Amino acid sequence: MRLHDEIRQRLAVLNPEALELHDDSAAHAGHAGNTGGGHFDLVIVSKVFAGQTALQRHRTVYGLLGDLIPDQVHALSVKAYAPGEF
């Protein structure tokens, strides 16, 4: 399974109303500290995030993807919103 698909599948448990995942890996290939993992920008909208702080939202996402970091995912930018905030 492609990494992009693996990330989407794991985040599906949040029942996202919107999910945008952009792979920026090609723009970062070979930079210092990168051992080959991908660079991703994530925008996700889910009812799960209602009433949560930004830190709680990020912890939720990283809890689902944490074992992919740093080997498969080198960098992940997360923008997590509750419905009505996006």
Image (cartoon, rainbow, N blue to C red):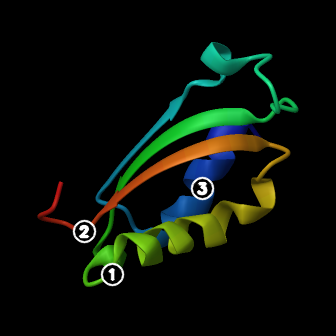
Circles 1 and 2, Cβ within 8 Å, touching? The answer is yes
The dot on residue 52 is 1
| Residue drawn 29% across the image and 59% down it | 17
In this orientation, which residue lies closer to the viewer: 32 or 57?
A: 32
Indicate left or right for 14 with 17 as reference.
right
Q: Position of residue 66 (x, y in %)?
A: 72, 63
Q: Is residue 67 above or below residue 55?
A: above
Few, some or many residues within 10 Å of mark 2 (<14, 14–19, 20+):
some
Mark linked to residue 1: none
Q: Earlier in the sequence, mark 1 or mark 2?
A: 1
Please name the amino acid that badge 2 sits on.
Ala
Q: Distance of mark 2 from mark 3, alpha carbons?
A: 19 Å
Above or below, 22 against 52 in this view is above
Quadrant where the N terminus lies? top right
Q: Residue furthest left?
A: 84
Residue at x 73%, y 43% (from the top left corner): 73
Residue 20 vertical placement versus 7 (above, below): above
Check the image and report above or below for 82 versus 39: below
Q: Secondary structure at mark 3?
A: helix
Q: Gap between marks 3 and 1, in whole Å?
A: 22 Å
Marks 1 and 2, Cα distance to the nearest angstrom?
A: 9 Å
Label 1 SS:
loop
Type of amino acid at the residue the image marks with label 1: Gln
Q: Residues within 10 Å of mark 3 (few under 14, many from 20)?
A: few
The label on residue 9 is 3
Tell us which disc is closer to us: 3 or 1.
Answer: 1
- Horizontal placement of 38 versus 58: left or right? right
Residue at numbered disc 2? 82
Q: Amino acid at mark 3?
A: Gln
